[in-house]
Structures are given as C-alpha cells and as structure tokens.
Amino acid sequence: MRFIWLLFSENNSLWAKWQKQYIIGTKSFWEIEVSAIHSWLWKSILQLRPLAAIFLRTNVADGRNTQFWWDSWTPFGPLIQYLGYSGPSRLRLPLNASVAAGVRLASWGLNITTLCCLCAVANETRGHVLLSCVYSREIWKLILLRLDPVRNLFSSWAELLSWLRQGSSAAPRTLRSVVAQA
C-alpha cells in the first residue's frame, strides 16, 4: 500500500517518478492490466488496487492531474465504474481525459457536453456535482438527517466548510470530515 501511496501523493520519490514515466506512461494506474513482463512487486501492487481505491480521493485543484474517468473525484467514485465503459463514448470524452480537458475542450467549441453527467440539467462544475445536483442533494439529505437533523442543505462551499469545522456529540468534526470525503 505504501508504494501506491507514493504514486498518488505529491512527493519527490524517484521510484514513483520512474514508475509513472516508464510503467504507467499515458495510461491510468487503474486501467493497467497485469502482464507477464511486470515484476512480482508491480503485480502485487496492481492486485492491491481495489483495496487502495477505498482510501484514495483526488483533490481536483486545476484538474490537469485528475483523470476524468479513473480518479475518484466525485462522490460516486471513479466515473468509469459509475457510468460504465460506454460513458466515454456517450459523453465524447476520451478514456484518458483529465478533468481540465473536459472543461477546456468544451470551451474550444467542440461538441462535448458541459452538462452534469448525473442529471444533465446544469453545467458540470465542482459546486454543482457535489452540492447542487439533485443526486448529491439527496445524498446530503440522508447524511444530514443522521448527523445534523436541524441543518438545511448547503448552498455554498463556505457553508459546507463551516459545517465541517463545527462539532457536536452526534457528529464530531472527524466524522463530518469523513462523510464529506466519501
């Protein structure tokens, strides 16, 4: 698991840089198939992917290093698992697209939908997908019903961050943070 962490954390590990350059290349770590040419260590690392996926979440930032289909940047996990292998062709986004690429391609006038991949009602932004989309709102309703029944749904990131900083006996800060990361 430590080696997987090195691949995804921002560090200066020579091992991680070499693996990204020569083994992973332009593919996603999540899509690489186990091959006879891989070392025993690399095969073991690839077999640990399902376990590692539970613990890894992606911080989108500018989206350049976030893989649209493979990284866990939405509350639903990797979109390839949520929408299936037909998702890339239906949304006309390549399998190796980054989050930034989807936004950039649409801004260039290419025929790529900017609508939310979950509800197809509003533009797909971080705020919409995680707070405003009808699907995420339903999830937040269920969460808040258990953790903070008097709390209304969040209307902004500032409200969500404020809620995360608060604590109560029913929902301590750590539990709130875990829920928000899931």
Image (tube, rainbow, N blue to C red):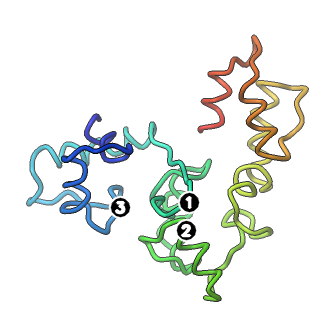
Question: Which quadrant of the view contains residue 29?
Answer: bottom left
Looking at the image, which residue sits at the far top? Answer: 169
Tell me which numbered mark, 3 or 1, is placed earlier along the sequence.
3
Count of number-bearing discs: 3
Pointer 2 and pointer 1: residues touching (CB < 8 Å)?
yes
Q: Is residue 106 left or right of residue 46?
A: right
Tag 2 residue:
100
Tell me which numbered mark, 2 or 1, is placed earlier along the sequence.
1
Assign the C terminus to one quadrant of the image. Answer: top right
Tag 3 residue:
28
Q: Secondary structure at mark 1?
A: loop
Q: Nearer the viewer, residue 15 or 28?
A: 15
Q: Nearer the viewer, residue 4 or 88?
A: 4
Estimate the x, y position of residue 166 in percent, counting from the top left: 76, 22
Q: Amino acid at mark 1?
A: Asp
Q: Nearer the viewer, residue 77 or 114?
A: 114
Q: Name the residue at 62% across, 82% down.
A: 112
Q: Name the residue at 80% across, 54% down.
A: 132
Q: Amino acid at mark 2?
A: Ala
> Which dot, 3 or 1, sits closer to the camera?
1
Tag 1 residue:
62
Disc 2 versus disc 3: distance between alpha carbons?
Answer: 16 Å
Estimate the x, y position of residue 28 in percent, counting from the top left: 35, 61
Pointer 2 and pointer 3: residues touching (CB < 8 Å)?
no
Q: Residues within 10 Å of mark 2 (few under 14, many from 20)?
A: some
> Which dot, 2 or 1, sits closer to the camera?
1
